[in-house]
Image: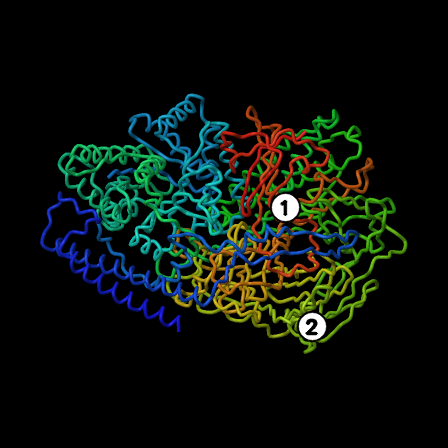
Amino acid sequence: MKLSRQFTVFGSAIFCVVIFSLYLMLDRGHFDHPKSPRREGTFPKGQLSILQEKIDHLERLLAENNEIISNIRDSVINLSESVKDGQKNPDGINFSQGYFSELLPLAPINLAIDPEDCSFASKSESQALDVQMLDVYDLLPFDNPDGGVWKQGFDIFVVPHSHNDPGWLKTFDDYFRDQTQHILNNMVVKLQEDKRRKFMWSEISYFSKWWDAIDSQKKDAVKRLIEDGQFEIVTGGWVMPDEASAHYFALIDQLIEGHQWLEKNLGVKQKSGWAIDPFGHSPTMAYLLKRSGFSNMLIQRVHYSIKKHFATQKTLEFYWRQNWDLGSSTDILCHMMPFYSYDVPHTCGPDPKICCQFDFKRLPGGRISCPWRVPPEAIHPGNIQHRAWMILDQYRKKSKLFRTKVLLAPLGDDFRYTENLEWDQQYQNYQKLFDYMNSHPELHVKAQFGTLSDYFEALRKIDNLDEKKSNSVFPVLSGDFFTYADRYHHYWSGYFTSRPFYKRLDRVLESYLRAAEILYSLALVQSKKSEKLNAFPSVDYYKLLTEARKNLGLFQHHDAITGTSKDWVVVDYGTRLFHSLMNLKKVIVDYAYILILKDKEAYSYSPSTSLLKMDDDQTSQDSLPRKTVIKLSVQPRYLLIYNPTEQERFSVVSIYVNLPKVKVLSASGKPVMVQISAVWDETTTVSHEAYQISFVAHVPPLGLGVYQLLEVLSSEAVLADYNIYINGRNNVQVNPDRIFKIKEMQNGVEDIILENSYMKTWFSGISGLMEKINTKEDAKNHQVKVEFAWYGTTSNRDKSGAYLFLPDGEAKPYVFTDPPTIRVTHGRIFSEVTCFFHHLTHTVRLYKVQGVEGQSLEVSNIVDIRGEYNREIAMRISSDINSQNRFYSDLNGYQIQPRVTMSKLPLQANIYPMTTMAYIQNDSIRLTLHSAQSLGVGSLKSGQLEVIMDRRLMQDDNSGLGQGVQDNKITANLFRLLLEKRSGVDVKEEKSSVSYPSLLSHLTSSFINHPVIPMTTYADTGVPPLLNAFSPLISSMPCDMHVVNLRTIQSKVDSGPSDEASLILHRKGFDCRFSNKDLGLFCSTTQGKIKVHKLFNKLNVERLTPASLSLMHSPPDARNISEINMNPMEINTFRIQLR
């Protein structure tokens, strides 16, 4: 009764407001809208333009009226929901976790998750926002109305710039030789000719190469230009990185590399970010810039419908806030460029035909002209009035899309200002226009050249005028800007997968670089304590590290990791990555040896020999790594295992040896249980050149474990058994083997089963593909089906290419005429099912161990589509989880972004980037696909996750590359599939704009992206005594703390190391509402607190001071701290000195 009375009152209120607002609208129709800036009277108005104004005015009033009604409607909905919910208070729920019991060998322990640490994920619901991108997508019809020339009505900053891709259609070095060096040389000369000229630069990879080649006179001139505000470096990263496929480790690393170079060589600190060409934008980048001390940023490539919507709402400038931030500490002021491109025709105003006439490089007689067939005219007294009015009209129209009287007009394009002539054409003609405008006060404008920071400073002055009011001129926005479309159905979701071989190589290099950095920093401290170790060439090794940082940084460029360069440019990137991979392996083995050596005084350095070697080998930049075979004898060989994660770890290690009679001993001499598996020459033929041995290694956090391998007469190792399923028609023969028990089976209806203490998994006896999982904790069966599928490309003129995904409809099932050969391994440490299809070899492995590795399935695919024509291959996981149209994908391995699959959008618009994970869920279960490489992912039907693994496309997609993608490699993709039970979930939460992985999920991701690194001693060298283990930390770090890097800082005087390192920590946000039984975690949580003196073992922390993320700034009160204290999701950098 009470409820219906409330609705009656509200209904009446709505009716009154509507009538009153209509009356106001009619009443106000007689007067000018007081808030809307009137059109300036300097241009002659005809009757038509007055009529047009009235129509515009009426439209605006209608829009306001609609807004009032929709606000009332929202209030009613909110009220009715709160009535339904009664007095439920989500903050009041107590998710106290109790203790975990542990089943791992050697160390049964109890683990406490602090209940306080569980409240973060449940609180992140109530953000105060003006714009949430998920809502914008929901609201927009995406019907692409013709924007036309925006019909709307000052301080003008014309900002000259040149966008230099570090590799795209040419290699980095070729671009530098042919274009970039000339641009920068001319910049020094041309800016000095007139103090009013300005210029901007972004990519430090190019700038540093140029700097190293110029004389001191030129260097001094550059410093003067920076000091005088004529030349500005924006962002200052090594490159302008891609924001979809890049991992946050590499994004931070290339920022540090650029910022450290600038600090050392120029002494400058950046304030503003400039990202005009990445294909979509991630809030991770906004966060990293904010943490680096930036106040402002600019973005360009955003979906055209969103740009139009933001233009009508005047929300193109906003404070970008992180989804998880309940305050405003992550806010950064962001400017979104309003039009199609960053070139001159699309930056002065809404009409490219007119703007093109003000790109003076296109003057008649030049190499490029205006596609609209109206050329620019050089400015002279006879045309200056008319031309000034023309461009001013564009500036005015553009300014109507923004909330202030400050206007940004970029003036540049790819590799602009190469020639002297262009500098004169642009700067002289624009200066004449500015002089004319500024000398006519009736125009009410002040026009000048500016830098990005000039513009933002002017903008902030306006925002601060209103300091009495707490609200800003600019709205607050949360969310991301994927997936980008520049026109029609041209969604740029193809590049999320293009050239997947190199996306995987990138992640392998990141893992090696991080391991090498940490080992180097720790060993450098040790080497200073010993005379003998001082002989080690740490400066030379530091140069290898620096080169690897630069090569990895270069690959984060938005035409590199994206897979959108010419074939030979891809080879150039690949060669650089491969070269650094080899060097990092050398750094890792040589420094691991120093750290594990018992008597440091017994050390002697020999440049020609390493005492350790890695257990795998890669022969070229485009081949897959192969395991090396370790030769055994009765003399023990040492096997060192490095754990790059910050928690104590039990991990299965698999290596190849030359004999099946093998024993593995722990450092204390105890035998370890070993599984011996066959190494296969062919699908069904065993090789006797090598055997795979697998055992569970126990390794300290960030430390080294030591094991011994030796040949024995009778091995206690357990041999794996094999069942091989063959189809009589495909001419496969199974040969009996003298060592392994191999049973031949017929493909059939009977299921194949793998089982461990956490789960039981069924596979089809015909296809060998997974069908269902039983979770033993609750004895429930879950349908989890793996399938493969093909996408073709559309038959229209525009087809899929390196950037664009334009499929010919839904994916078609991967059809095989004969069932595949299926090889099933049953072992004590792991069991697996491998299916051999024509285009891929698919393996699902189940580890029979307690802890993190036993709780998920390892899925690996070796994909080869080199013979295909315009096809893309996808792996689809279909489950009975009712996920409806929602799924979740990560952004840059840093945060989770909820996604909604929308039927109003084409299929390709519903594909999103996945850097490390994607999941679907209902209120009782979550299914996560963890990935060891960046790929495109979607959930096109309820209960499904689909990942696109490779694409082969025969044509260009008209986005600038000028070729298809036909350089496919045999590519390895690695995943883990984790099924988790959820509990205590609120229904409203399912619509939330934020989500977090569980702790188990975070650790699973860490295991797959940071695998342990095995190394062996050479057979023929005598080995001095080694420590039983190297443990640099006193104990595991908290479960939610991740050491992003421990990176030795470069010396200020030369290219060697200093005695300082940067310690970068990330406290991960996690969701506690998952089963906490037997997780096997060797860590607890501590509310983000770490006592510094309890961190390192046998190393003293001399000094630890907070710094900004890229070390550019130190807080004014930066003191030596004794306790690290971090909030969830925070990434902090500290300068650390160890002794």
Q: Is residue 194 visible?
A: yes
Give the structural element (helix, strand or loop) at label 2.
Answer: loop
Q: Could you tell me how far apart the alpha carbons at marks 1 and 2 are, in whole angstroms?
A: 60 Å
**Residue drawn at the location 73% of the way across and 49% of the way down:** 628
Disc 2 marks which amino acid? Asn
Q: Is residue 497 visible?
A: no
Q: From the top left corner, tell me how far across and down residue 351 is, in percent.
A: 24, 50
Q: From the top left corner, tell me how far across and down residue 770 is, in percent.
A: 64, 69
Q: From the top left corner, tell me how far across and down residue 170 is, in percent.
A: 45, 43
Q: Nearer the viewer, residue 633 or 973?
A: 973
Q: Is residue 374 left or right of residue 89?
A: left
Which residue lies under the disc numbered 2? 731
Picture layout, residue 947 above or below residue 580: below
Picture layout, residue 59 above or below residue 116: below
- Sequence-wise first label, 1 or 2: 2
- The part of the image, by quadrant, that contains residue 789 is bottom right
Which residue lies under the disc numbered 1? 1086
Disc 1 marks which amino acid? Thr
Labels 1, 2: front one: 1
Q: Is residue 391 left or right of residue 1085?
A: left
Q: Nearer the viewer, residue 819 or 251?
A: 251
Q: Nearer the viewer, residue 373 or 749?
A: 749
